[in-house]
Amino acid sequence: MIHGWLRDSRLHSYLYTTCTDWPPATEELMEMYCYLFYQFDQFWEQKKPENVMAFVPIKEEFKKLYEEQLAQTPPTIIMRL
């Protein structure tokens, strides 16, 4: 997900506003990965899927939520655990 957003430039605006250096350091990308991993885990638990076959639809719903946030100007993702 993050790799795709980097490739199609969706994350660039967010990273420009939050990172002190360009290109962003590996640590900043890892923080974002960990944040999204944690958020997806919370989202998954909230959805209470019947089985693992629900993974793709739930992942797509989660992805859409974050893509909407990234599309805003400025991006509204606030990384808080």
Image: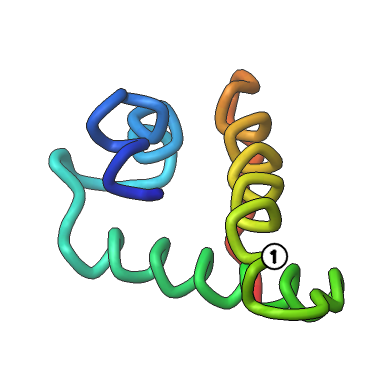
> Where the C terminus falls, by quadrant?
bottom right
Against 29, is 71 above or below?
above
Residue 40: where, in percent of width, then height? Answer: 62, 68
In front: 54, or 34?
54
- SS category of the residue bearing label 1: helix
Q: Nearer the viewer, residue 16 or 60?
A: 60
Q: Vertical placement of 80 versus 10: above or below? A: below
Number of marks: 1
Say which residue appears at 59% left-offset and 45% top-offset. 63
- Which quarter of the figure has residue 18? top left
Residue 25 sits in which quadrant? bottom left
Q: What residue type is labelled 1?
A: Ala
At horizontal 40% and vertical 49% (from top left) the residue drawn is 1
Q: Position of residue 67 (x, y in %)?
A: 58, 34
Category of crowding for the residue at label 1, using alpha-carbon neighbours closer than 10 angstroms: few (below 14), some (14–19), many (at least 20): few
Q: In this view, does 22 lie to the left or right of 46?
A: left
Which residue is identified by label 1? 54
Q: How is the image coloured?
A: rainbow
Q: Residue at x 65, y 37 (%)?
A: 64
Tell me residue 17's x, y (percent): 42, 35
> Where is 13 relative to 20, above or below?
above
| Above or below: residue 49 compared with residue 28 | below
> Would you identify the image quadrant in which residue 29 lies?
bottom left
